[in-house]
Image: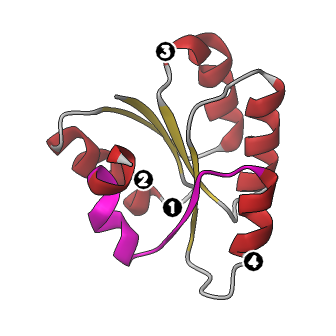
Amino acid sequence: MNIVVIDDEQDIGFIMSFELKLSGHEATCFETAESAKDYISKNLSTIDAIICDFQMPKLTGLDIFRWVREKNYTGPFYILTGEPTMDTERLLKEGVTQVLFKPHDLNKLSEILKK
């Protein structure tokens, strides 16, 4: 799978990309929503899944989710958060595939992507 990872925390993005690559996936990691949007626009048809941090400077993960849906991306979109009180129900109603929680879901990425 070709997976885009967006997280403003460099260490988290590196860990996710590393684990995904170990599991045989291609992973492209971005620290800003702006750089990710540029890549996604140019490579939309080749992207199999997107994992995006919820709380980032300028744009939230939900902003990015809405933007990719406007671009007709229909693949899985995962929101990543460190907030245990996140309103996951609202995000799922919006159409987000799944909400992943830092740090414990990071170790399960390959399993989660198989669903």
Q: Which residue is mark 4?
A: 87
In the image, what residue type sits under mark 3? Thr
Indicate the secondary structure of the residue bearing disc 3.
helix
Q: Write down the quadrant of residue 1 in the picture.
A: top left
N-term mark: 3 or 2 = 2
Q: CA distance from mark 3 to mark 4?
A: 30 Å
In the image, what residue type sits under mark 1? Glu
Question: Which residue is at the front of the view, 91 or 56?
Answer: 91
Q: CA distance from mark 3 to mark 1?
A: 25 Å
Tell me what residue is drawn at x 80 percent, y 68 percent: 90
Q: Say the numbered circle drawn on residue 9.
A: 1
Q: Write down the quadrant of residue 71 in the picture.
A: top right
Examine the rendering and report whether any part of residue 15 can be seen. no
Q: Say the numbered circle drawn on residue 13.
A: 2
N-term mark: 3 or 1 = 1
Whole-percent x, y for residue 97 in the image: 60, 51
Magenta segment boundaries in residue numbering: 95-110
Q: Say the numbered circle drawn on residue 46.
A: 3
Whole-percent x, y for residue 57 in the image: 75, 58
Q: Are marks 3 and 2 in contact (CB under 8 Å)?
A: no
